[in-house]
Image: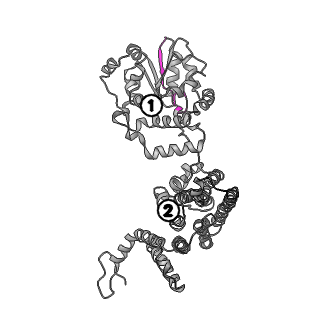
């Protein structure tokens, strides 16, 4: 149906703030008294259904944890902003999410049918339905910016007739989502009928539709709730990034730049197959932090329970339900198996593997090594968790001496699955000191932010290498390519602090720079 005539009818534009909201009682009373046959156009989400159908659909996708991660990545990347012209923007967010998740998990369409039956039985707006069906003569149309294939299974379960379902199409949702609802309706219902209809919606986005109908009802139903999909699903490292240290880019600055890169420089650089080894180390770092963030979560819970003025982030109460004691372990064990497997693969001679000359004895040897390393690594994760429990339940002064044990697991625990050398061990020890010393300063009442971590790592690494080389009368340590690479990395990371140190230095006989306060 041509919608040009409908658009020409919209001579008056109603602002969102000018819309008059109707009460539930007023709306229900109207339908009980309306005996004349009418076209009734019902919004679906949070109106006929007391939930959001799109979020409910996405919330049923299995495997749940992987789906939650994909949704998180989509919200971080926001691919809908890159769609061309009028098809892009936040309006198409739901379409992209539904499209991507349905393509990746097509079996969810069948899972959704069972869940849709439960929703139709438990969450349909029964008060609204009872009021509308008081008189059987009404022609009921469901018009929604949700998706027809999602809504349709619920419509089929209703015990009253729906004459038409009008929603967004699966493949063309980017187009439908940008249309006004009256334009969607006009594809199947005449302009004259629309103008004489009764419309019930909770969305202020339907202002243009409410402006042209005879009986508009904008109603916010008390029992209706918008519950985001996967809001209670555990995502590895989510708590650390969004709850414990929101806005601090913890994954980038601490996990990747400090932890992962230092392990790659200390362990992977000396591997004969560094690609496999780096992949394995990356997976094991993720597994380690799945367990380590459990300690953060427990620390917040204990603070909330025992401290009079707990220091909790603004997002703690919003997201703490996403964490539990077991899901991080499921992820950690699975990722650890893949990680240890990659590290073990890095020790296999690929030339022999390609020529199929690996003996049965060699295969058994690698399987045995894999089993031993996997068991040892899981022991490291368990020791890490137990150490963090002791850290969380002991007093703050005692924590000063528990904290370095956590750092031992964090940096040296990886040696149970991979070998290092003297240069690598020196780097890991430098990292341990960089973590421990500022923490000790903080616990002793000092300002940890005055501690120049990057310069400290740089100097400790150089000093230890020089001392060992001199003490062992072996200069080979200092001409090792690994030593040079680590030195360059540590130097680049400390560049800004070194420049600040240089600019602040002055002789006591001279006047200090203007930005340095004079000492008494």
Mark 2 surroundings within 10 Å by alpha-carbon count, few (fewer than 14), some (14 through 19), many (20 or more): few
- Which quadrant holds residue 508? bottom left
Q: Looking at the image, which is closer to me, 337 or 32?
A: 337
Q: Which residues are magenta?
A: 36-53
- Pick the quarter of the image with the N terminus: top left
Residue designated by label 1: 203
Question: On the picture, is 419 further left or further right than 198?
Answer: right
- For image coordinates 48% across by 70% down, the residue present is 482
- For image coordinates 36% across by 82% down, the residue present is 519
The number of numbered badges drawn on the structure is: 2
Question: On the picture, is 49 further left or further right than 394?
Answer: left
The percent position of residue 249, horizontal first and vertical second, equals: 46, 57
The percent position of residue 465, horizontal first and vertical second, equals: 50, 79
Q: Name which of mark 2 and mark 1 comes first in the sequence.
A: 1
The percent position of residue 478, horizontal first and vertical second, equals: 47, 78
The chief SS type of the magenta part is loop
């Amino acid at each position: 149906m041509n919608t040009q005539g409908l658009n020409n009818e919209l001579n008056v534009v109603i602002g969102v703030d000018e819309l008059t909201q109707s009460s539930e009682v007023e709306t229900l009373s109207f339908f009980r008294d309306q005996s004349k046959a009418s076209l009734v156009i019902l919004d679906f989400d949070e109106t006929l259904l007391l939930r959001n159908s799109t979020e409910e659909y996405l919330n049923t996708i299995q495997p749940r944890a992987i789906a939650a991660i994909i949704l998180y990545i989509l919200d971080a990347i926001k691919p809908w902003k890159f769609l061309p012209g009028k098809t892009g923007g936040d309006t198409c967010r739901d379409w992209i999410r539904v499209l991507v998740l349905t393509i990746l998990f097509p079996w969810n369409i069948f899972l959704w049918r069972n869940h849709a039956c439960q929703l139709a039985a438990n969450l349909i707006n029964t008060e609204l339905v009872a009021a509308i069906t008081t008189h059987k003569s009404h022609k009921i149309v469901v018009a929604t910016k949700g998706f027809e294939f999602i809504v349709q299974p619920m419509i089929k379960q209703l015990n009253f007739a729906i004459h038409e379902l009008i929603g967004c199409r699966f493949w063309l949702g980017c187009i439908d989502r940008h249309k006004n609802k009256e334009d969607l309706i006009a594809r199947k219902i005449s302009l004259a009928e629309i103008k004489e209809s009764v419309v019930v919606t909770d969305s202020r986005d339907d202002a243009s539709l409410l402006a042209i109908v005879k009986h508009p009802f904008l109603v916010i139903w008390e029992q209706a709730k918008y519950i985001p999909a996967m809001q209670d699903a555990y995502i590895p490292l989510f708590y650390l990034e969004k709850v414990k240290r929101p806005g601090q880019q913890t994954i980038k600055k601490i996990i990747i730049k400090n932890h992962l890169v230092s392990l790659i420089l200390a362990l992977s650089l000396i591997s004969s197959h560094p690609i496999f080894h780096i992949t394995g180390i990356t997976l094991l770092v993720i597994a380690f932090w799945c367990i380590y963030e459990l300690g953060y979560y427990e620390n917040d819970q204990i603070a909330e329970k025992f401290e009079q003025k707990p220091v909790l982030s603004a997002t703690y109460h919003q997201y703490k339900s996403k964490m539990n004691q077991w899901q991080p372990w499921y992820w950690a064990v699975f990722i650890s198996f893949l990680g240890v497997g990659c590290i073990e693969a890095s020790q296999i001679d690929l030339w022999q593997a390609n020529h199929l000359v690996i003996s049965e004895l060699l295969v058994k040897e690698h399987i045995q090594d894999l089993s031993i390393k996997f068991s040892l690594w899981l022991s490291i994760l368990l020791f890490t968790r137990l150490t963090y429990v002791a850290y969380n339940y002991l007093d703050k002064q005692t924590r000063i001496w528990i904290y370095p044990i956590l750092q031992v697991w964090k940096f040296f625990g990886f040696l149970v699955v991979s070998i290092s050398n003297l240069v690598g061990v020196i780097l890991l020890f430098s990292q341990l000191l960089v973590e421990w010393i500022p923490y000790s300063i903080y616990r002793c009442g000092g300002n940890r932010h005055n501690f120049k971590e990057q310069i400290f790592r740089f100097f400790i690494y150089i000093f230890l290498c020089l001392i060992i080389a001199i003490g062992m009368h072996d200069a080979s340590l200092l001409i090792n390519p690994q030593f040079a690479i680590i030195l360059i990395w540590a130097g680049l990371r400390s560049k800004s602090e070194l420049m600040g140190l240089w600019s602040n230095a002055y002789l006591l006989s001279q006047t200090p720079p203007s930005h340095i306060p004079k000492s008494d």
